[in-house]
Amino acid sequence: MDRIIFNHVLRGFPADEKFMQIVDQNATSITNVCIALFGKTPTIVCGLNVTRMNKQGVTDVTVDDGFLWTGDDLIPVEGNVFSGIDPDIDLYISTTSTTEQCTFFDGNLYDAYYSNKGTVVNAQLNPPTKYPFRLSTIVRANICKSVVSDIDITDFSNTEKHIQGSLRQTVYSDGQVNICGTFSVFASPIDSELSTKGIKVAQLPFKNTDMGDIIPGGGVVPQHYGVVYPALIRANGNFSENIYDEKKISVSHFVKMTKDGSLYAYIPVELFKIPLLHDNHTIRIFYFVSVDFTYNSRK
């Protein structure tokens, strides 16, 4: 990239047309790089990290300075300090554009400098409709960062199916989540609810935004509606004519995640061809899960 050498600027640098062309060319180059990397999506390039500290029941929130790509301009954003707010809901970036006039050689004032910058503001004091950038929803450029944690597996549906296993969630800073792992359920061939109602096995700490708020054709999405994701089910054996077969049986199926982050397992017991040896006969079925979705984090 072309640059200006300022070593002798105090001797009277010739701020001529070439000087202005280099300055404008470099600004255009930076804009083109941002378009290539982020497109028109508003993106936090660096900084603007949120720090929370609880003092005597009141949450103090600090946001440091940073840079925001607005979709067509790269602007500096001034951080701020807040108290008693929810940073996921209340914090917005307010952008301000100004021009500065200077006296030209013909003795007249003309617009000479353009400035575009942002400030983190509290939407409780400033109507959010004025500011198009909610801080918690802007994607970050550092997409390689992630947080890995375990998810508790339990029988939220109280079906007494002896659910066991573990799931792991990986939350990426670009808003993507992966849920993977294995759990098992004791299933009976006469338990049709495993195929129709499913079993709630996990409650995720965030909402799935792959599902919209409106059903195609109109109407609000009911709470029990969800998005389905592929999964693999395997049983350790098969019963046929009262003879136990050692081979493993695998079936492609799905899990469902509702809007509030509830994870449901559906077991098609009829596909395992398990004849009823006695009234309480069950077989352990293993569920292999790997789910990728977009989240709206409140934690």
Image: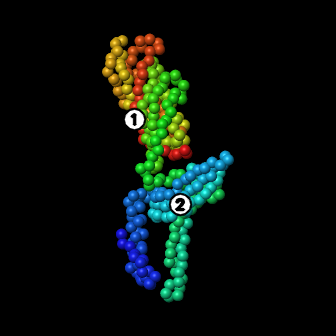
Q: Secondary structure at mark 2?
A: loop
Looking at the image, which residue is at 51% across and 46% down?
A: 296
Q: Position of residue 146 (x, y in %)?
A: 45, 46
> What amino acid type should be assigned to the residue bearing mark 1?
Pro
Looking at the image, which residue is at 55% across and 62% down?
A: 78
From this view, report whether residue 230 is shown above or below residue 121.
Answer: above
Circle number at residue 158: none
Circle number at residue 65: 2
Question: Is there a contact, CB below 8 Å, between mark 2 and mark 1?
Answer: no
Q: Position of residue 41 (x, y in %)?
A: 45, 56
> What amino acid type should be assigned to the residue bearing mark 2?
Asp
**The quadrant where residue 16 appears:** bottom left
From this view, report whether residue 195 is shown above or below residue 91.
Answer: above
Q: Position of residue 293 (x, y in %)?
A: 44, 42
For the question of whether residue 266 can be seen, the reply is no
**Quadrant where the image shows the C terminus:** top right
Which residue is denoted by mark 1 in the rendering?
230
